[in-house]
Image (cartoon, rainbow, N blue to C red):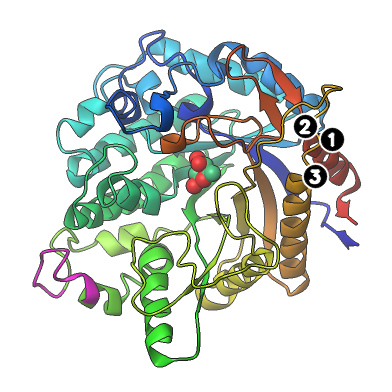
């Protein structure tokens, strides 16, 4: 049995494009995801987030489901294009009004809102001017952060600038699998830098608007181990870790970009200078702006062998046979790697407040003959990962919160609606919601503040 400290925050998470729908309602502008889903072949089954979970209209019902389960915190993301349809320029009051209503509804139900400003849905108008590869997008983001924190800051005290810059940069600009669908490594590097810079510049702005609040960033982590002790495997794993983790955690924690990776990127990044050309004097200091917490999203880990393709993000699967199996995303289940990574953040980076801002599993279990959804495998996954968090806390790592991805089955990006991560099942035809057994289980974990 493991107990969680009294001030440990349990929550659930979701993101705007994945649940809101109402893609062009109330003056909302077009985002790069609105554009991307319309391009043939981009999304499995040609699906889109145009309606998604229709949370824009059903948010009261969704807040009600969270409240009934006694969930204390909800991490939502705001859609830039609802508030600034063109990314810059005039504010759309109806967009602001939606987030006002949502935040008020949460607070009325005693659910603490956590707000993330960017979960990959850049205004298309900014993409048309080069998107994140254009340094001017940094200023546009800072203005958006300034507006949101000014408007919601009286009620929202927990702010996150970005969600998973690695994904936005590399899956969006190197792999071409996510919006905007580019395949240019050098561009991906510039994008990553500008996203990090926009984070660093937004931090003091949010802080000055919400002096009694806190602000951080969410990075995805992908722990890995060398497939063997062979020097080539060890070197390959180090490179993978540099690509996937250190390139982001190092600058956020004031270490600058890792030199081994700068060297490794010179060719593909098309630069021959000591530092990449998009890094201007002072940038790294701004990126390292002190934060109140670091958020990490964790799903899986992998073994890395020499010769593995770096694009193989989720699994160089050399006969890998994880004892805990795989989720339906095909991701190996490796809870102990979460403990290890949390320790590393504390030991190597000195992180003083760490939140697991996303963790969860895709399983397609739906209603049985009695209508009940017995998603034991999700319960098992969450149990093991909460246990991994509790172990990190026992090691003295300051982990202060855990958020399940996700409250609802939703639009899983390029995979459309084929993956179900929710604690609540959603009928994507009718919008009907049915709480799964995992929601009841999580509810009792929260009430008892312990896992068996
Ligand atoms: C994370 C994303 C989230 C969801 C989960 C499964 O990388 O932040 O939107 O897609 O993966």
- Of labels 3 and 1, earlier in sequence is 3
Locate residue 316: give its quadrant: bottom left
What element does badge 3 sit on? helix
Q: Residue at the spot x=77%, y=32% of the render?
A: 436
- Of labels 3 and 2, earlier in sequence is 3
> Is 271 included in the stretch rendered in magenta?
yes
Taking the view exactly as shown, the residue that stands out farthest to the top is: 26
Measured in 3D between alpha carbons, the distance from the residue under mark 3 to the one under mark 1, in whole angstroms, is: 12 Å
What element does badge 2 sit on? loop
Q: Report the magenta residues as a range.
A: 264-274
Q: Residue at the spot x=58%, y=69% of the render?
A: 341
Find disc 2 in the rendering and name its residue.
Answer: 436
Find disc 3 in the rendering and name its residue.
Answer: 376
Q: Position of residue 139 (x, y in %)?
A: 25, 39
> Image check: 259 left or right of 449?
left
Which of the pair 337/134 is nearer the observer? Answer: 337
Q: Residue at the spot x=26%, y=22% of the render?
A: 86
Q: Position of residue 359 (x, y in %)?
A: 63, 50
Query: Residue 44, can we see it?
Result: yes
Find disc 1 in the rendering and name its residue.
Answer: 440
Q: Residue at the spot x=42%, y=23% of the render?
A: 48
Measured in 3D between alpha carbons, the distance from the residue under mark 1 to the one under mark 2, in whole angstroms, is: 7 Å
């Amino acid at each position: 049995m493991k107990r969680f400290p009294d001030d440990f925050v349990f929550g659930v998470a979701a993101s705007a494009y994945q649940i809101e729908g109402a893609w062009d309602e109330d003056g909302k502008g077009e985002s790069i995801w609105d554009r991307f889903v319309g391009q043939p072949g981009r999304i499995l089954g040609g699906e889109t987030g145009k309606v998604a979970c229709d949370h824009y209209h059903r948010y009261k019902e969704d807040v009600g489901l969270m409240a009934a389960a006694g969930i204390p915190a909800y991490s939502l993301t705001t859609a830039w294009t609802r508030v600034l349809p063109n990314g810059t320029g005039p504010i759309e009051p109806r967009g602001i009004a939606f987030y006002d209503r949502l935040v008020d509804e949460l607070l009325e139900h005693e659910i603490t809102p956590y707000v993330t400003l960017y979960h990959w849905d850049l205004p298309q108008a900014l993409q048309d001017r080069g998107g994140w590869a254009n340094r001017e997008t940094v200023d546009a983001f800072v203005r958006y952060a300034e507006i949101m924190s000014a408007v919601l800051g009286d009620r929202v005290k927990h702010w996150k600038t970005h969600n998973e810059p690695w994904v936005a940069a590399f899956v969006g600009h190197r792999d071409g699998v996510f919006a905007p669908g580019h395949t240019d490594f050098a561009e991906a590097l510039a994008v990553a830098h500008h996203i990090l810079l926009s984070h660093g510049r937004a931090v003091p702005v949010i802080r000055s608007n919400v002096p009694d609040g806190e602000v951080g960033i969410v990075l995805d982590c992908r722990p890995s181990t060398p497939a063997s002790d062979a020097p080539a495997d060890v070197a390959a794993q180090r490179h993978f870790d540099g690509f996937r983790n250190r390139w982001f955690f190092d600058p956020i924690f004031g270490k600058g970009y890792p030199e081994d990776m700068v060297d490794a990127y010179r060719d593909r990044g098309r630069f021959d200078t000591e530092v990449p050309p998009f890094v201007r004097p002072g940038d790294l200091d701004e990126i390292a702006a002190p934060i109140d917490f670091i958020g990490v999203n964790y799903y899986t880990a992998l073994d890395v062998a020499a010769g593995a393709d770096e694009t193989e993000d989720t699994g160089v699967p050399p006969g890998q046979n994880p004892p805990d199996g795989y989720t339906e995303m095909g991701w190996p289940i490796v809870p102990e790697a979460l403990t290890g990574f949390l320790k590393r953040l504390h030991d190597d980076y000195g992180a003083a407040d760490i939140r697991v801002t996303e963790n969860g599993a895709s399983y397609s279990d739906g209603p049985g003959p009695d209508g009940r959804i017995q998603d034991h495998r999700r319960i098992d996954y969450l149990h093991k990962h909460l246990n991994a968090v509790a172990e990190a806390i026992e090691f003295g790592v300051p982990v202060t919160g855990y958020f399940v991805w996700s409250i609802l089955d939703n639009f899983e990006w390029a995979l459309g609606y084929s993956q179900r991560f929710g604690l609540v099942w959603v009928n994507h035809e009718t919008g009907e919601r049915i709480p799964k057994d995992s929601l009841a289980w999580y509810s009792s974990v929260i009430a008892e503040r312990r896992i068996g």
